[in-house]
C-alpha cells in the first residue's frame, strides 16, 4: 500500500472485525454444554475490547511481509488470554471492580464461581486453539511450538501473572520507578511483546527483523501502560467505562503519581520515539505498526 | 518383568519419586521472582498428591512398549493442571474448603488473590513445559502437538472445567444418575483419560491399542470417582485429610446417595471389570495398569 493511502481508523475497524469474526468462529458456541459457562466466556470476550494485541500481531506479521490472515488462530488465542486475565483481575479478591468498559464485570453477571471458571476456561481455550489440528496447517511445526511457548511464558508466573501478583502486593505501599516498570513490563508488556514477536515468527522474520520488532514491542507495551495510567487520571467515566481515578483511590502506584502528569507524558513521548526508531529498518509495510504506536500514546494527550 | 515379581506398592513409590523429582526440576524455583507466587505454586504441587495421573500416563506408555521416562514432561504438566484445579476448587467462592489432604488449602496460607493467581500460573506452566524447547526432543512434533491438544481439551470448558461448573450448579439440587456421570466423566474422568491416552500416543500405540487404553481410561476414571464418593462417606478424617461427609453436608450428589453404599460398591466393581477387560489384548507390560485399576476400586472396600 502507498503511504498516502493509509488511514488508521478504517484499518483498525477492518482488523477488529476480522478478529471478532474469528473469535466467534473459534470459541465454543453458546449452546455447547455447559451453556452458562460458554455464555459467560463469550460475554467477556465480546465486551468491547480494542483487540490491540491481535491487531499488533497481524501488523508485525505484515511488517515482515507475511500474510496477516495466517496469524488469526494465535491472535484469537492471545485475546482469549487477555480476556481471562481481565475476568480474574476484576474478581472481589483481586481489584474488586463492578464495571469494565462501561459494562458489569463477569462475576457481577454470572457470580464469582462461574467467573473464576470462565477465566480458567478461556486460558485453556487459547491452548486448545493453538494446538488444534484444524487450524494453522501452513505454519511449520517448530514455529507453532515456539509461538505456543512464547504466549505461555508471557502469560505465566514469570510474565503477566507475575506482574499482577507484584501489583497486588504493592497496593497501598510506596514503590519506586523500577518496581513500577517491573509490574508493567510483566502485567501488560509481556503479552503485548509476545503478540508482536509471535507475528514476527509466523511472518517468517529474520533475526534482525525479529530483534527490531521486539524493541518496538517493549517500547510500545510500556507506552500503552503509561498512557493508560494518564487516562485513568484525566478521562471522564463515559470515555473509559471504569471508575475514574480508581487506581489512585486504591493507592496503586502509577506513572503520573511517580513522575507527575507532565513527567508521565514526557515518558510516553520518549517511548513512542523508541518504538519509531526500532521500525527504521522496515519499509512501508510497517506503517500500521508506526501509526499504532503513535495512536497508543496520542490518546493520552 | 515377570508377573510373579510385580509389587504395586514399591512400584507406586518409585514412580511417585520419579514424578516428584521431575516436578521439582520443571517448576520455577521458589527463589524466582515473584517468590511468594512461586512458593504458593510449589506449596500446592507438593502437598502430598498421589500422582495418580502421571503414574497412569507412564503405565500406559509402558503398556505399549514405550519408555515411561519419555512421558515425564507431559506427566508433570498434567499434575500441574490437576494441582491448579484443586486450588481453584477449594476457593471460598467455590467449595470453600479450609483443608486438603490434612493441610491448610492454598488460600488459607497465601490469601485468596495469590491462590487464584497460583492456580492461573500452574495451568499456564503446564503449557510452558509442554512446548518447551528443552524437553521432549525425542517425541515427534505431531505427537507433541496432539498431546498438548488432548490435555488442553480435557482440562477446558468441555472437559474438567465444564464438569466443575455443572457440579457447582447442581449443589443442593436433586440430580439423576446421567447428570452425576456427566459431572464425573468431565470433572475427574476427562483428565484421567487424557493421561492414559497421552501415554499411549507418546509410547507409539497403534489404533487398536489406543482405543483399548481409552476404554480402560474411561472405566478407571469413573471408578476412581465412585471410590472417592464411597470414601467420603466411610473414611475417618485422619485417613482422608478432609472433612468426612463434607460432600453430603453441602448437598452434593454422590454415587452412594443415588445408588446406596452397596449399589455404589457394585458400580465400582463393574467398572473395575470393564477396565480389566479393556486390557486383555496387552501382555504383561500392562500389569501395572491392571493393578492400579484394582487398587483404585479396592481402597473403597
Image (cartoon, coloured by chain):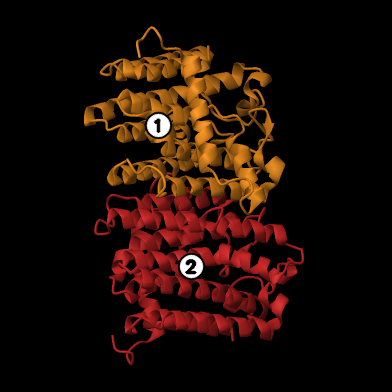
Chain colours: A red, B orange
Query: Residue A54's x, y, as percent?
Result: 41, 67
Query: Residue A160's x, y, as percent?
Result: 55, 59
Residue extending furthest toward the bottom:
A4
Q: Residue at x 36, y 16 (%)?
A: B287
Q: Work out which quarter of the rendered image holds the N terminus of chain A and state it.
A: bottom left
Find residue B239 and report its image quarter: top right
Query: Residue A105's x, y, as percent?
Result: 58, 60
As measured in the structure, the alpha-carbon distance from the residue carrying label 1 to the one carrying label 2 is 36 Å
Q: Nearer the viewer, residue B296 or B246?
A: B296
Decide if residue A154 is on the left or right side of residue B213: right
Q: Residue at x 46, y 19 (%)?
A: B11
Question: In the picture shown, does residue B266 fall above or below A85?
Answer: above
Q: Say which residue label 1 marks.
A: B69
Residue A299 seen in the current view:
no
Give the class, few, some or many, for how many residues have Cα within 10 Å of label 1's Cα (few <14, many ≥20): some
Q: Work out which quarter of the rendered image holds the C terminus of chain A and state it.
A: bottom right
Q: Say which residue label 2 marks.
A: A192
Residue B224 seen in the current view:
yes
Decide if residue A124 is on the left or right side of residue B93: left
Decide if residue B128 is on the left or right side of residue A93: left
Query: Residue A283's x, y, as percent?
Result: 33, 83
Amino acid at each position: 500500500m502507498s503511504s498516502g493511502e493509509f488511514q488508521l481508523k478504517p484499518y483498525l475497524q477492518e482488523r477488529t472485525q476480522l478478529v471478532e469474526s474469528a473469535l466467534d468462529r473459534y470459541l465454543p458456541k453458546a449452546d455447547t454444554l455447559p451453556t452458562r459457562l460458554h455464555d459467560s466466556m463469550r460475554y467477556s470476550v465480546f465486551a468491547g475490547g480494542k483487540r490491540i494485541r491481535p491487531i499488533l500481531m497481524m501488523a508485525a506479521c505484515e511488517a515482515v511481509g507475511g500474510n496477516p490472515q495466517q496469524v488469526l488462530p494465535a491472535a484469537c488465542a492471545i485475546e482469549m488470554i487477555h480476556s481471562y486475565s481481565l475476568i480474574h483481575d476484576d474478581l472481589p479478591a483481586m481489584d474488586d471492580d463492578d464495571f469494565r468498559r462501561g459494562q458489569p464485570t463477569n462475576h457481577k453477571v454470572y457470580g464469582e464461581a462461574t467467573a473464576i471458571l470462565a477465566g480458567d476456561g478461556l486460558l485453556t481455550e487459547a491452548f486448545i486453539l493453538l494446538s488444534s489440528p484444524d487450524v494453522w496447517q501452513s505454519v511449520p511445526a517448530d514455529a507453532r511450538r515456539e509461538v505456543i511457548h512464547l504466549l505461555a511464558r508471557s502469560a505465566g508466573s514469570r510474565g503477566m501473572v507475575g506482574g499482577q501478583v507484584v501489583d497486588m502486593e504493592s497496593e497501598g505501599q510506596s514503590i519506586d520507578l523500577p518496581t513500577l516498570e517491573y509490574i508493567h513490563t510483566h502485567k501488560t508488556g509481556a503479552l503485548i511483546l509476545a503478540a508482536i514477536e509471535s507475528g514476527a515468527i509466523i511472518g517468517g522474520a529474520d533475526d534482525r527483523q525479529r530483534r527490531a520488532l521486539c524493541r518496538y514491542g517493549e517500547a510500545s507495551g510500556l507506552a500503552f501502560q503509561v498512557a493508560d495510567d494518564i487516562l485513568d487520571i484525566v478521562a471522564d467515566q463515559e470515555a473509559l467505562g471504569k471508575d475514574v481515578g480508581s487506581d489512585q483511590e486504591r493507592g496503586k502506584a502509577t506513572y503520573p503519581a511517580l513522575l507527575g502528569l507532565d513527567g508521565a507524558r514526557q515518558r510516553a513521548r520518549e517511548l513512542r520515539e523508541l518504538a519509531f526508531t526500532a521500525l527504521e529498518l522496515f519499509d512501508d509495510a510497517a506503517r500500521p505498526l508506526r501509526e499504532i504506536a503513535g495512536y497508543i500514546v496520542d490518546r493520552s494527550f
